[in-house]
Image (tube, helix red, strand yellow):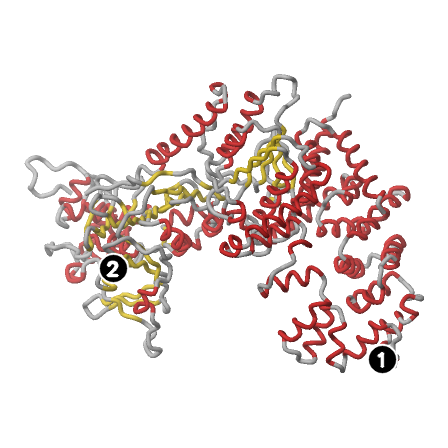
Amino acid sequence: MTFGLDGLRTRPAQTWGSIRLVPLVRDEPVPGLRLHRVAYDEPISVVDVGDGSSYTSYIPHAFVATWRDGDELPAASYGARLLERDTAPAPERMPIRTTKRMARKAGKDRLRFLPLHLAVEGYLALHFGGPTIAWEEWSRKAVAQGLSPRAEAAYLGRQVRGLEDALRIFEIHPGQCGVLVYVADALASAFVVPHPDDYRALHATLVEDMYGELIYIHGLLGARTGDVSAGIDDSRIGSLADLRAAAVRGRAEWAVFHDEVMARRLFDEKGTHRHVQRLRDFHLTRFLPSFELKRENHIGEAIVDGDARVAYLKTFRLSDGQIRRGHLLTWLAKHRWRLRDAAAAMRVTEANLALRLERSGFGYLLRQDVLDHYRAQAARGETFRPPDPPSGGPAVT
Amino acid sequence: MTETFADLIACEDALMFVNAAITSTGQREFHHEEGEQRLSLGFLHEYVLENYRDLYAASLALNVNDHNAVLIVRNLLLRAGDVDVERRRREGRLIARRLGLLPPQRVYRLFRDLRRRGVNNRRTRAIMREWMAGRPDPAFDAVKYRDAVKGAMRHAHVRPGAAADGELGPFLFAPRTVKRFATPIFETWRRAHYEREALYELPYTVAEGFAAKHKVPRAVFAERIESKMTRLERLRLQESTGAAADLGAMPLTRLATYALSLSLDDRARRRAELTEALRTSARRIAGAARGSWGRVAAVLDDSHSTSGSGRKRRRPLAVALAASYLLEALAKEYTPLWTSGRTDELLLYPFGPTPLGERIIDALETGPERLIIVSDGWDNAPPGLAADVLRIWRSRLDPGHRYGGAQRVQITHLNPVYDADDFDVRRLAPTVPTAGIRDAEDLPTLVELARFAEGRVGLPALQAHLDERTARFLEHS
């Protein structure tokens, strides 16, 4: 399944310092789905992983998606009374709450999930199970416990310099249902909701979202956004009507330029999708990119309706290190965690691959003696030579 | 007559300063924080004082706001020694005239500041003495601004003299030695120390202190003190308690601010009353110029950024709304175009982006003689379109551009917000004159002043204009 930003129209960008915000506008809201913001009383949450250990996280806010048969109520989505049960303060003697899963049913027709947590979790859990066949290179821990413990660094939006000011100053368009955030013209995140009222209520939550290392660094550098407006060519203007036509054309050209150039790598056609949950016509989906090196890679989550319209979207741009890790895991998984095959397919020696794994922070997955062996091999400076046909014989090292 | 490059720069600097002095109050704005504003404004004052002292003094005659007027007076007195006697005398007259127009609390605060900085030259003392001698009711001042009056008298070596039957001196400097004052207000003040009833005879701010001392309930106090409040104090109290305000007495911009502070339901309910008050006030300001501006189109900003800041809530929108009513009175035919496309002026609230470019095209299509744009200059939907439209209009489409600059459409951009980064109000296009605006009441004079920003009228003309304004300003003293 693929989806894009169909049904959403791009409006002129607004810039502040190094931040560029590109508004997305819908003609009419997606019917039947609303998002609400739930402000938790205690921000610490514990996820029960299931094997006795638990995963603790800080949750600044969560969204609740609601499904309804008829038209949505005109009331603002912030702080609706329906949610009382979820927001009621926990008894004082239990300061932390145990959450079973990140995406959880909050009622018969509601699903609660934590923005981006799902996506990041999805990325981490890509090969959560680890090797499925106990090849001799892998440590016992890797076979028994998979890639756990999982840890990825992300920055709070507040720490991205200028973002908070930019969001405060940003002028929301009528009918606006989404925004694309650029920092120094690098696409940081896309955010889409089903209804303009939802957007107005949730606009400010963008500073509480997670952003990758790349975006944080770009914010620190504080490079100003470039001027990408083309301006009007006066030689072809002879009347006010011409001027108006040129303005309309300029607006359309910007939208096309933005969608086809600036936001082109948001959706990766070679990436993978995974349905997390389904309610009525809506699917909650996580998507992962192809982890191709040296290009943009976005992970994210989306709620898509029966007509493949995006009702909800939130993406997270991976940093280079994260892309490298994802890339390695993808190759390993493709070759069923067989180091020899993966290395051959990547056209590197097994030792190279093993050391790359170690450098990427996966060293604990390999058995210590195997790793030492590869280290010695690498020290001898052996390089990759293609295996002799027919393949399948002992790998040349 | 040839113009030097230095003249051009001087002209630009002068207007930049005037724009800043009209719009900036060193308070927080939508885009910039308070600290930035103060730094930026402080630098500008230093720069202009150092390089164009004449102009710096002359700007007291322009509609600069009170905050900047006080800063200018202070800086001139602080650096009095830098200029010769002749110029000092001229500055002195300007200062005296301006102090007469300022609210007394601001002047007393200025005196306190001068004292703190140790400014005590002969001229400063003379100015202080003269101003205090000119106060209509010294006894009232002595009660209301007791500490400030005391400080100022000590600093400027003013003798209390025969004011208030010679009781001013004892009242200020040794009140405990007096058993009974003959001046009624002094006597009330003395009694208010131990008698609860007496405090309702005192000015509001003074009574407030005594009320706290006697533990008078707030509601009782507010009700009984009302007759002793100044107009503004009453207005503030009415606004905070939701009581109906006296619309007839309010100036235009304040009236617009008041209307916008009401809820949409209230505005709809009181539509006739509010519209009438705004129209009457606008007509009063337009005066003889009523209907003399011909066909006027206005592009007015009601985007999200006109919500201003916590310090100046909805100020830019209020200025635009007031300007719209004033323009309606000045024009023979008037077309207002709000950026959001809304047409019901009374039900405006700040919302949405600022598509200035498209609105300017709409406005030009009505074929106006004058086009007034009231906006903070953050054109963002799409950015830069307004500049493009104005440039192309000027260079290719304006019917007047062929006849050697005798432009038929006079375009002026008025900006209610000071931009701390540029030391000026934000401009839309280099070819369109921009002036800062604080109160819509100043609109006619500002449109006149904005001609200079265009660069077509040079420094001599600006100098002449300033001289004329200065002369007119001093004439009334």
Front position in the image: B235 or A279: B235
User: Which corner quadrant of the image does residue B401 belong to?
Assistant: top right
Q: Is residue B61 visible?
A: yes
In the rendered view, would you say B205 is above or below A310? Answer: below
**Number of marks:** 2
> Mark 2 to mark 1: distance in Å?
75 Å
User: Which corner quadrant of the image does residue A371 belong to?
Assistant: bottom left
Return the residue at label 2. A111
Disc 1 chain ID: B
Q: Amino acid at mark 1?
A: Arg
Residue B403 % position (x, y): 64, 17
Task: Please rate how many residues cluster around mark 2, counting C-alpha atoms within 10 Å: few if below 14, some from 14 to 19, many from 20.
Answer: many
Q: Is residue B438 visible?
A: no
Return the residue at label 1. B176
The answer to whether B144 appears left or right of A195 in the picture is right
The answer to whether B59 appears left or right of B426 in the picture is right
Q: Secondary structure at mark 2?
A: strand
- At a point 66% along the width and 51% down the height, the residue shown is B25
In the rendered view, would you say B280 is above or below B211? Answer: above
- At a point 70% along the width and 43% down the height, the residue shown is B285
Instruction: Have a look at marks 2 and 1 and say if they share a chain.
Output: no
Q: Amino acid at mark 2?
A: Leu
Front position in the image: A93 or B335: B335
Residue A372 % position (x, y): 21, 54
Residue B319 % position (x, y): 61, 46
Q: Which of the numbered marks, if any, corresponds to residue A88?
A: none
